[in-house]
Image (spheres, rainbow, N blue to C red):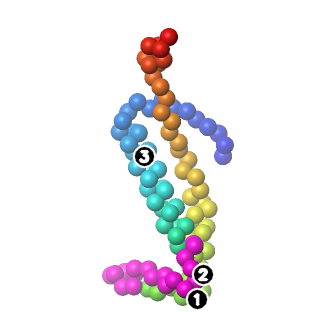
Amino acid sequence: MTDLAKANICDHDVVEIIEMLQQWHANRLEKLQMIVQVPSDTELVLRGKNGQQISLTGEERKGFKAGCATALELFGKFPLTMTKVASDDTDAGQE
């Protein structure tokens, strides 16, 4: 979807929430990318219920990496961007 919407946000709490969401999204992308690009000689270990470790090998490993690659594609670019805009007060003072 390429529709763009603009909103003037003056509420610091809203800006902070958006920034936190952007950071959360970036962290998830980084972790997924790391899993997808892990070398074949690196062991993949998940933590299961009750903290037990599950080592992924063979088809399980391939399936897990494929699932992570799919999630990475679906996450894509974060759908919100913020741009700081100079206030009208600043512009008026320069004239």
Q: Tell me which label, 2 or 3, sits earlier in the chain.
A: 3
Amino acid tagged 3: Glu
> Which residue is under mark 1?
58
Are the residues flagged by discs 1 and 2 in contact, CB closer than 8 Å?
Answer: yes
Residue positioned 41% across, 39% down in the render: 15
Residue positioned 49% across, 82% down in the render: 44
Residue positioned 40% across, 49% down in the render: 20
> Which residue is under mark 2?
62
**Which residue reaches farthest right?**
2
Query: In the displayed structure, would residue 11 be above or below residue 74?
Result: above
Q: What stretch is highlighted in magenta?
A: 36-53
Across and down, in percent, residue 4 comes to 61, 37
Across and down, in percent, residue 57 comes to 54, 88
Q: How far is mark 2 from mark 3, CA to CA?
A: 34 Å
Between 27 and 49, the residue placed more toward the observer is 27
Q: How far is mark 1 from mark 2, CA to CA?
A: 6 Å
> Which residue is under mark 3?
19
Is 79 positioned to the left or the right of 27 in the image?
Answer: right
Amino acid tagged 2: Lys
Across and down, in percent, residue 63 comes to 59, 79
Reply yes or no: does residue 30 show up in magenta: no
